[in-house]
Image (spheres, rainbow, N blue to C red):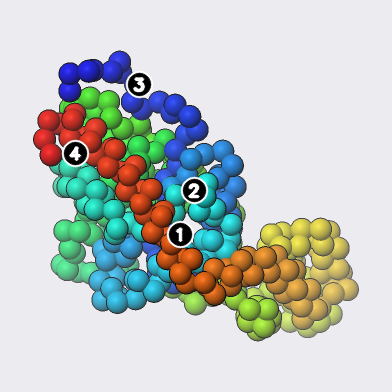
Amino acid sequence: MSDHKPAGSATKPAGRPVILSGMRPTGRLHWGNYTGALENWVRLQDEYDCRFMVADWHVLTTALDKAGEIKANSREMFLDWLGAGLDPERSVLFLQSTIKEHAELFLVMSMMISMGRLQRNPTFKEQVRDLNLGGEISFGHLGYPVLQAADILAYRAHAVPVGEDQLPHLELTREMARRFNFLFGDVFPEPEALVTKFARFPGTDGGRMSKSMGNTIEISASPEEIRERIKPAFTDPARLRRSDPGHPEVCGIYTWYQKFLPEALPQVAEECRTAARGCVDCKKQLAEGAIAHFAPLRERRAEFEANPARLDEIIASGCDRARALAQDTMMRVHDAMGIG
Ligand code: TRP
Ligand code: SF4
């Protein structure tokens, strides 16, 4: 408390800026998660000090009945991450529930925000509506953004890569950080959202790829699974016969080409529009492109999967690094508040 630092000194990045992001472990990651987040995270490692968290506590807020699956799903998530190229040397990969400091900071941050503000959170209102929760909303569920704020602030992160759907949570985090800093002095940077821009990635039915829609293809899918999932996938509904000209811009397969076989795009578009190519062959070519795209990820994933002791070690050492960082933040919090 005594050695007061000039305003801002605690919150400006000294070295590389810090990033924190997380995902809830609800099952194997799919192509939509990959293009929408994971692929971007892999790139961010070159420029930022990254902390990536498996948000297992957050699963409890909306799927308490599936608590028994969280542990296995968390392991799957680490495997997907490592396979995709998150680097446990450069980045801190950790499991939220092993860092008890998040729970303490959650408690502190819960004092920095009003009930009304949390109740007005659009994500919360949507979930209450969509999950048919009626009166059965837990205190923890209402506090979802407070726990998320604790996740971010525990590492005094400068930036948080998230999808657009998470922007309300980021705004709430910034408000809590501001409130704390105003009351107790500059401890937390106000984290910026790094919005992952991705055109909505189509699933096998042409709608947005999402686990709840059953239209996903997993990034760990085998070549055989990929071919099988693509075969019946949605194309241009106007192409009833092989001889009907197609409209690649409305076709989900064409969007997948943009991601996995961009070099083939001009030819695909031309041949689709003139009905020179049929959807069956078009899908076959795309399937092989996607298989090749994910082959290195699958191989790397399999290596980690074949060595559970090594995976345990990677997770444990990531958690140890995260804990040390979060403990440092909590010392600053205790110091600033004069309590704890
Ligand atoms: N709420 C995020 C999601 O559903 C997951 C998450 C938990 C998170 N804690 C976080 C994301 C901290 C960014 C930062 O996708
Ligand atoms: Fe889609 Fe290819 Fe069929 Fe055209 S030919 S509608 S791009 S699958």
Q: CA distance from mark 3 to mark 1?
A: 33 Å
Residue sitting at x 17%, y 68%: 136
Chain-order first, disc 3 or disc 1: 3
Of residue 255 and residue 37, the one placed in the foreground of this image is 37
Residue 111 seen in this snapshot: yes
- Residue 244 picture location, percent across and down: 81, 77
Amino acid under label 3? Ser
| Element assignment for label 4 | loop
Residue 196 seen in this snapshot: no
Amino acid under label 1? Ile
Please tell me how crowded label 4 is: few (under 14), some (14-19), or many (20+) other residues with Cα within 10 Å: some
Q: Are marks 1 and 4 in contact (CB under 8 Å)?
A: no
Amino acid under label 2? Ser
- Mark 2 vs mark 3: in front: 2
Chain-order first, disc 4 or disc 3: 3
Residue corresponding to mark 2:
91
| Element assignment for label 3 | loop
- Mark 2 vs mark 4: in front: 2
Q: CA distance from mark 1 to mark 4?
A: 35 Å
Residue corresponding to mark 3:
9
**Quadrant, the N terminus:** top left
Q: CA distance from mark 2 to mark 1?
A: 11 Å
Identity of the residue furthest to the left in this view: 339
Chain-order first, disc 2 or disc 4: 2
Of residue 185 and residue 32, the one placed in the foreground of this image is 185
Residue corresponding to mark 1:
314
Amino acid under label 4? Met
Residue sitting at x 40%, y 26%: 12
| Element assignment for label 1 | helix
